[in-house]
Image (tube, rainbow, N blue to C red):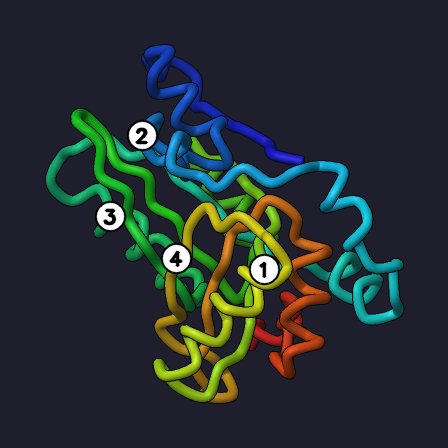
Amino acid sequence: MISVRYPIGLTKTRADYNLLMNRGGVLSSREETCKRVIDPSRRATQRPNMSAFSTAIARDPVKQFSVFAENRVGRLYDLTSLFQSHDIHIVALTVLDATDSSILRFLVDDPDQARELLINNDFPFTEISVLATEIEGEHRIKDVLGALLQAEINIHYVYSFLVRPSEKNGLVVNVEDSEVAAEALNTSGFRILTQADISR
């Protein structure tokens, strides 16, 4: 479920709105046309049963915030300064640049407090659950992608962690079916992270 918040008085165009609502601003129209088409009937026969593992992920999913920011000097600085002043740590970050604005996607170690700060300081944002997996190093990125390819999971975007409490590497993955993707990665030996795993 995607929630969208705009501060009072913010002017937004339909393009801006569509960018945010399209999975937190994850796909351009050209990227959308490049997605591989999966036969739904074939996918249905491959879908695994809900396991205790999947249930644990569903109960404590990793939360990603996507903040809509005008292209003006200092906006990212304002956000990071706000978080730092309240002892909130950004553990993963990526930026999607558009013509007149940017989408700042990030994970934090305290999503509840971050959400409150974003609302109270008039930062327009969306919030979704994403898949996060632990990897031993960059050489394992291919294996993560291979596991998702084998399960015929379309990937919307991927970015890496800046830091984790365990000091291990990690990837943030937004996919079309998180439950099936998590099962596929777990079966391939990858540890799927919960929000508790990245909180300090």
Mark 3 or 1 closer to N-term? 3
Element class at badge 2: helix
Mark 1 or 2 closer to N-term? 2
Query: Which residue matches tag 4?
Result: 83
Element class at badge 4: helix
Q: Are marks 1 and 2 in contact (CB under 8 Å)?
A: no
Give how far across and how far down residue 79 sits, in percent. Answer: 31, 49
Quarter that holds the C terminus: bottom right
Quick one: label 4, few (<14), some, or many (20+) residues within 10 Å?
A: some
What residue is at 35 percent from the left and 53 percent from the top? 82
Element class at badge 1: strand
Q: Amino acid at mark 4?
A: Phe
Give how far across and how far down residue 179 sits, in percent. Answer: 72, 55
Q: 192 or 118: nearer the eye?
A: 192
Q: Amino acid at mark 3?
A: Leu
Label ID, residue 131: 1
| Picture quadrant where residue 101 is located | top left
Report whether residue 122 is seen: no
Query: Which residue matches tag 3?
Result: 76
Mark 4 or 2 closer to N-term? 2
Establish if 137 lies above or below 50. Answer: below
Mark 4 or 1 closer to N-term? 4
Give how far across and how far down residue 32 sits, in percent. Answer: 41, 32
What residue is at 35 percent from the left and 63 percent from the top? 84
Quick one: label 3, few (<14), some, or many (20+) residues within 10 Å?
A: some
What residue is at 52 percent from the left and 66 percent from the top? 109
Q: Which is closer to the viewer, label 4 or label 2? A: 2
